[in-house]
Image (cartoon, rainbow, N blue to C red):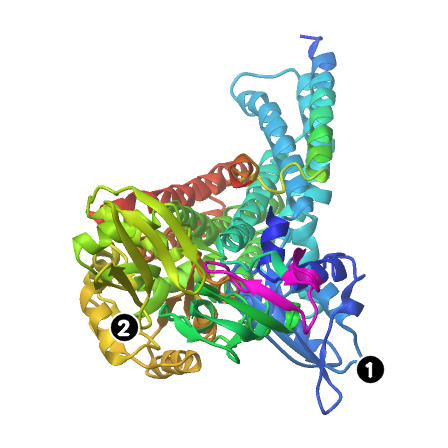
């Protein structure tokens, strides 16, 4: 099914790319040689990658530094907001495999644009093992700690200690390996990686535990294992749902038919769209979609080009007219000569361009650059503590105080504050129909001041509905059309049902290509045929009886959604390629204050950029290929999942419902999550300052530190769990 | 109380077997996608 959709959507390239780069990036370098790079005039090569697993602004900083310091790299920029990296290097000096290897060694997973990230199985295994070991060590630790109160026989104590050591060894040496490799890569390139204090704490704790086990002192291996397990869990939480959002969106997206009717010498055969060649003649009937680009050689009809132009009004098409893949023939019949197939079609070329456009340069968002400072500060305090107590001649306190500093000050709470709250926000938004590709997209929504909405398919239904007609005309037309699956027929029948008109029984109904529908209703002959574009005319025995005006209608809940957005202080603007009057009418119906009519696709992107130039953050919601540039240009691009597949590729978020309400929920979730993150950061920084001071002063022994450390994480988890609740409150 | 010298290693071995099975399951791709399979029946 998924394969059919991908093929149907004309995204065959997806499979080509998958096969071509199937050996995923990661520790293995294999596969990067085959990546297509752009070679510039000065002999340097350029490529754009997506980095999974960027956790904070400091990750960006570390990665950029590391890459820029690599000989042969001319330019390396990493965007935190989109997780995209842009690299330019001298191919003679260094190759992409080496660069990708460096990035993966830091703990981030580089991949190509357009290919979706795979879940990191290795991380899950490490987490599973760490949790298993941590739980067992905890269990063994209980009698040890209780032994402080009631005395425990030494041989049992030794058993528990050695068993703990046995369990802690794989945790420290293998599960914590990502932290070590991140820290070492950072050090090699003279940057302070956030993993450094974690790595030092793990190393110190493990060495301390090793010695303590031999000596028979308290080991604190339980805090080591819990620390590693919690940190791995935090890492795991990130990027979840990303893949899902993209896949779900793809399956909702519009598609082109997989099979077509091709003319042969003697008749017509049904063939797979893949088998078509230029010059083939295709028969296309009313209600069908075009699978290819082509020229009309016979017949007339009305074609809906919404996928390309974004406007629902049908275009009249005659001999010589050009049709494009993805558009729909609303009525009439056409014979089309195939001009372009597969990746050559307008649809596919636009999709390809959009994939590149998606890789926009983004400035660094206002986020915490504290993490590297935190690392430095922790190490400084720890070494000062050690030095201080050693100078004071108290070496046993020096060890315990230093370990206590490293453990309590572990950036755990700080590192978890963002992914946890963001994951809660992502979940809350997803349950309300707005799925984000990454947490950054969601969080950036909180900083948005302007919301630009596309008209067709976003504010409006993006499909034909009856705009005006008399009840009687609708009743008769519905009688004729009730068994047809044609879009117009469905619109008329739906309207009749909505107006609660009982459907009459049509007799002798027959459809004559190009002439309309004939039939008997209430014992009289009727004929339903196309009038001027967007109009259907009902003829009776004595001439025209009436007209049905078809068009695009505002979604029933658009007005409510817009009102809520405006109420939240957002500047809502309607961008449409349509005429001023039409755009104005839709805007009035939906209650949108600002209207920009007659904007072409590139114009929408220009408008977004102009708005951004005035210092505003802009969110853009749209469907269709034509919205791609604007979706890419906006700070947060949100695609309607019902729209074109390619718009989904460039968007940060996808609305999976036929409504704008998820957008409102998204803003609320973003606000709520951002608030939770800020509070979590305040809490964890406050905790760190107090706890580190106390630990450095020797007031906290490592045991208390080990209890406090998970407590600080619990505090952060509690903060994140309030995201959903605070969203509900803001709704009231 | 001496039985604990037998029971704790036994517990660790049993636990270890399950940890190993977990690793096999992850390698098999069992946890790659926890969301779609329950919905897949609705999609065809």
Dot 1 or dot 2: first in sequence order is 1
Q: How many marks?
A: 2
Q: Is residue A9 magenta?
A: no
Looking at the rendered structure, which numbered label has been put on residue A92? Answer: 1
Task: Tell me where residue A467 appears, x and y as whole percent.
Answer: 24, 62
Asked if residue A672 can be seen in this view, the reply is no
Q: Is A248 displayed left or right of A352 in the figure?
A: left
Residue occupying image coordinates x 66% and y 21%: A157
**Where residue A229 sits in the image (x, y, percent)?**
59, 40
Instruction: Using the image as rendered, state which of residue A475 and residue A565 is in the foreground.
Output: A475
Closest to the observer: A655 or A277? A277
In-front residue for pair A588/A592: A588
Horizontal relation, residue A551 to residue A354: left or right: left
Q: CA distance from mark 1 to mark 2?
A: 50 Å
Nearest-to-viewer mark from 1 and 2: 2
Quickly name the residue at label 2: A573
Residue A360 x %, y %:
52, 75
User: Which residue: 28% across, 46% down?
Assistant: A726
């Amino acid at each position: 099914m998924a394969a059919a959709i991908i093929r149907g959507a004309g995204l065959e390239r997806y499979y080509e790319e998958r096969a071509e780069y199937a050996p995923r990036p990661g520790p293995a370098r294999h596969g990067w040689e085959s990546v297509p790079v752009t070679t510039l005039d000065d002999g340097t090569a350029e490529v754009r990658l997506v980095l999974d697993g960027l956790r904070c602004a400091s990750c960006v900083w570390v990665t950029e530094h590391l890459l820029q310091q690599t000989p042969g790299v001319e330019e390396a920029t990493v965007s935190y907001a989109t997780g995209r990296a842009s690299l330019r290097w001298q191919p003679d000096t260094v190759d992409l495999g080496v660069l990708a290897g460096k990035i993966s060694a830091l703990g981030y997973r580089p991949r190509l644009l357009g290919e979706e990230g795979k879940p990191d199985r290795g991380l899950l295994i490490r987490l599973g093992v760490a949790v298993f070991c941590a739980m067992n060590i905890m269990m063994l630790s209980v009698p040890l700690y209780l032994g402080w109160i009631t005395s425990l026989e030494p041989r049992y104590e030794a058993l528990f200690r050695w068993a703990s050591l046995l369990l802690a060894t794989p945790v420290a040496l293998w599960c914590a390996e990502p932290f070590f490799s991140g820290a070492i890569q950072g050090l090699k390139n003279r940057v302070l990686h956030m993993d450094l204090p974690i790595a030092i704490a793990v190393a110190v704790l493990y060495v301390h535990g090793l010695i303590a086990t031999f000596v028979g002192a308290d080991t604190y291996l339980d805090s080591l294992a819990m620390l590693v397990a919690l940190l791995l869990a935090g890492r795991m939480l990130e990027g979840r749902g990303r893949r899902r959002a993209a896949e779900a969106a793809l399956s909702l997206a519009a598609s082109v038919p997989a099979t077509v009717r091709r003319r042969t010498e003697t008749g017509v055969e049904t063939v797979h769209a893949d088998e078509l060649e230029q010059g083939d003649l295709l028969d296309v009937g009313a209600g069908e979609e075009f699978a290819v680009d082509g020229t009309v050689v016979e017949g007339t009809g009305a074609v809906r080009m919404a996928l390309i132009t974004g406007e629902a009004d049908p275009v009249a098409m005659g001999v010589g007219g050009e049709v494009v893949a993805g558009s729909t023939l609303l009525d009439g019949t056409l014979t089309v000569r195939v001009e372009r197939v597969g990746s050559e079609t307008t649809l596919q070329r636009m999709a390809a361009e959009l994939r590149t456009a998606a890789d926009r340069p983004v400035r660094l968002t206002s986020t915490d650059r504290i993490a590297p400072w935190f690392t430095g500060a922790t190490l400084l305090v720890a070494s000062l503590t050690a030095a201080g107590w050693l100078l004071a001649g108290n070496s046993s306190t020096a060890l315990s105080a230093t370990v206590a500093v490293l453990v309590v000050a572990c950036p755990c709470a700080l590192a978890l504050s963002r992914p946890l709250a963001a994951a809660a926000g992502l979940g809350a938004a997803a349950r309300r129909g707005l799925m984000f590709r990454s947490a950054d997209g969601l969080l950036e929504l909180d900083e948005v001041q302007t919301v630009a909405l596309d008209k067709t398919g976003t504010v409006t239904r993006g499909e034909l509905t009856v705009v005006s007609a008399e009840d009687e005309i609708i009743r008769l037309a519905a009688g004729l059309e009730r068994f047809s699956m044609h879009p117009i027929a469905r619109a008329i029948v739906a309207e009749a049902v909505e107006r609660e008109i009982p459907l009459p029984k049509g007799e002798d109904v027959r459809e004559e290509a190009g002439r309309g529908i004939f039939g008997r209703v209430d014992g009289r002959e009727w004929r339903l045929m196309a009038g001027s574009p967007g109009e259907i005319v009902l003829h009776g025995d004595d001439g025209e009886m009436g007209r049905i005006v078809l068009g695009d209608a505002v979604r029933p809940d658009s007005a409510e959604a817009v009102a809520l957005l405006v109420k939240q202080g957002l500047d809502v603007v309607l961008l449409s390629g349509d005429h001023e009057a039409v755009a104005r009418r839709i805007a009035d119906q939906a209650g949108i204050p600002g209207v920009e009519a007659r904007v072409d696709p590139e114009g929408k992107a220009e408008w977004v950029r102009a708005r951004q130039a005035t210092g505003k953050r802009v969110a853009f919601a749209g469907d269709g290929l034509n919205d791609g540039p604007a979706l890419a240009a906006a700070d947060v691009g949100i695609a309607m999942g019902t729209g074109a597949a390619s718009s989904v590729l460039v968007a940060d978020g996808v609305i999976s419902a036929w409504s704008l309400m998820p957008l409102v929920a998204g803003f609320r979730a973003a606000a709520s999550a951002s608030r939770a993150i800020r509070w979590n950061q305040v809490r964890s920084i406050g905790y760190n300052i107090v706890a580190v001071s106390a630990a450095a002063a020797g007031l906290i022994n490592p045991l208390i530190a080990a209890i406090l450390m998970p407590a600080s994480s619990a505090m952060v988890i509690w903060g994140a769990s309030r995201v959903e609740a605070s969203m509900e409150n803001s709704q009231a | 109380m001496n039985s604990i010298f037998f029971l704790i290693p036994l517990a660790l071995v049993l636990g270890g077997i399950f940890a190993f099975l977990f690793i096999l399951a992850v390698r098999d791709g069992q946890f790659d996608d926890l969301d779609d399979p329950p919905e897949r029946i609705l999609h065809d």
